[in-house]
Each structure stands twice: as C-alpha cells, then as structure tokens.
Amino acid sequence: MKPTPLTRSALFVYGILALVFLYLPIIAVGFASVSKARYLTFPIKKYSFDWYGKALESSTVYDLVASSLKVACIVTIVSMIVGFFGALAFARYHWRFRGLFQKLILLPIFFPQTVLGLALLIWFNSIGIIPTWHTAVVAHLVWIAPIATLIIAIRAYSFDPALEEAARDMGASTWTVLKEVTVPLLMPGVISAGLFAFLLSWGNFPLSLFTTGADSTLPEWLYAKMVSGYSPLVPTVGILSIAVSVVILILAYIIFCIVRAVQQNRLRASA
C-alpha cells in the first residue's frame, strides 16, 4: 500500500521538525561560540573566532582533553575485549549459569548513573583508594562494558554455529577457529561496541563527577563553567568536543569499511 501524498507530506514535515528539534541546540551553541558578546543574543552583532584560538592555546583545555581521551580510550579497548568474550558467553554458548549471567551482566545498565557513581565513590573510600582518573575508568567500565557486551551479543545471536563446526571438522584448532572464523564474523559488532563505548565515556558526566577526584574531565569542566565563570570559551570547547566525536565517527566508518573489504577479499580468495 502506497502512502498518499498527504501522508508523505506529513511525514516529511515531521522529519524536518524532528531534525530541527535535535540539532537546534547544537546550532545555538555554535552561534554562541562565535559571538563576541559575553552572552548569546540574537541577532549577533559581532562575530569572532578568537575563542577558538584561545581554546586551542589553553593548557587547561589541553589537560582536560588529554584526561578525557585517556579515560575514553582505555574504556573503549577494555570494553571491546570484555564485551567480545562476554557476548560469546551471553549469546553463543550454552552453559549452566547462562541465564543468571545474562541478568547480572545487564543489571548495571538500569542503575541511575548518579547512584552508581556515589556507590563506587563510597566503595573506593572504604578500601582506601583515592579517586583519580584511574578510578573513573573503573566506574565507566561498570556501566559501559555491559552495553558493549549487549551490542556484540546482538551480532553473536545471528552467528551460525555450523561455521565453527565446519572449521573444526577440517582440523582447525580452537585458536584458529577463534582467529579465522569467530573474530571476523563478530568484528562489525565489536567495532560498533567500541564506538559506543568511546562516545559514552567521552561525554559522561555523572560517573566522572563522583570518581575523578582531583582530576577533571571535559564534561565536568563544562558544567563547572556553566555554573560559575561562564565565558564564550565554554560553547567553543563544547563545539570542539562535538567535532572530536564526529571525527571518531568518520574514523570508525572508515575502519568498518576496511574490515569489510578485507573479509570480502578473504572470501573471494578461499572461493
């Protein structure tokens, strides 16, 4: 059944309104970053990109970006590894406590991040660990690793066990099966999980607020400056943070295309 012209027009208008609703705040932040006035007003009387230069030259911003990148990169790598093997246990193999494992691994996702961050802070203090960006990595992993596991598990559910069995029938060892069959087939899910892990850690505020201690990440600094000491440097750093996220998305897409091309070449070579 083809939609009527009125339905198509209504869907088109709805799509435009949805996009405006989603991206208008980001556009407003972009305007605020190039306004020479201290606070954003429309119409903007004077435009200036001086704040971008100050942001790029600021040692404080550099330290904040470095801290956030360290946390996000470590969380991404560990989440991809934990998520890969967790997804195999979650969706691929049948074992005695699989149902209990499936429930427990997803439980942290449903905790409010503020409650989870406070609980981790109390736990760190009780065992004598001083909160730093290292403890923030642990806190992020508690919440993000289950999400990565679930993303890879979705890919693992479509995994055909006959492929592994055929490789074993041909004399392949467990390591060879894992390297040549399991990993390539699950790689799109692993890349997607890594992308989600990076973006969720990069922009995470509640867990970082409770667990970084004397260190600070970019979202914490942006919040602190919004509460007191606001200047156009705040939206400028926010736009640069969004730019980093966009670059990561592009790089992830390029990596995905490369991996898919390699897999197709392998299939053609084996055929």
Image: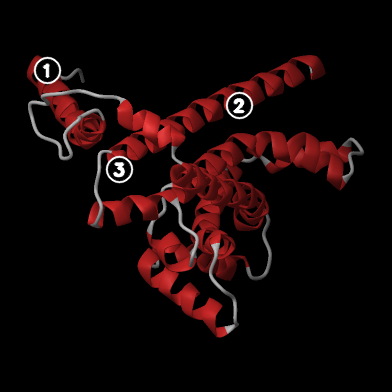
Of labels 1 and 3, earlier in sequence is 1
Of labels 2 and 3, earlier in sequence is 3
Q: Nearer the viewer, mark 2 or mark 3?
A: 3
Spot occupied by residue 143 in the image (x, y as percentages of width and height): 49, 60
Q: Residue furthest bottom?
A: 126
Q: Residues within 10 Å of mark 1 (few under 14, many from 20)?
A: few
In the rendered view, tell whether residue 221 sits above or below residue 251. below
Q: Say what amino acid the circle numbered 2 marks.
A: Ile
Q: Quadrant of the C terminus?
A: top right
Q: Which residue is mark 1?
A: 4
In the rendered view, tell whether residue 116 sits above or below residue 61. below
Are the two marked residues, 1 and 3, in contact with CB atoms closer than 8 angstroms? no
Give whichever of 173, 14 is nearer the camera: 14
Q: Residue at x 26, y 30 (%)?
A: 30
The mark found on residue 234 in the picture is 3
Q: Is residue 143 left or right of residue 33?
A: right
Q: Is residue 1 something one can see in this rendering? A: yes
Q: Say what amino acid the circle numbered 1 marks.
A: Thr
Q: Which residue is mark 2?
A: 255
Q: Say what amino acid the circle numbered 3 marks.
A: Val
Label 1, label 2: how many angstroms apart (C-alpha)?
41 Å
Q: Could you say whether the residue bearing mark 3 is in a helix, strand or loop?
A: helix
Q: Name the colouring of the figure.
A: secondary structure
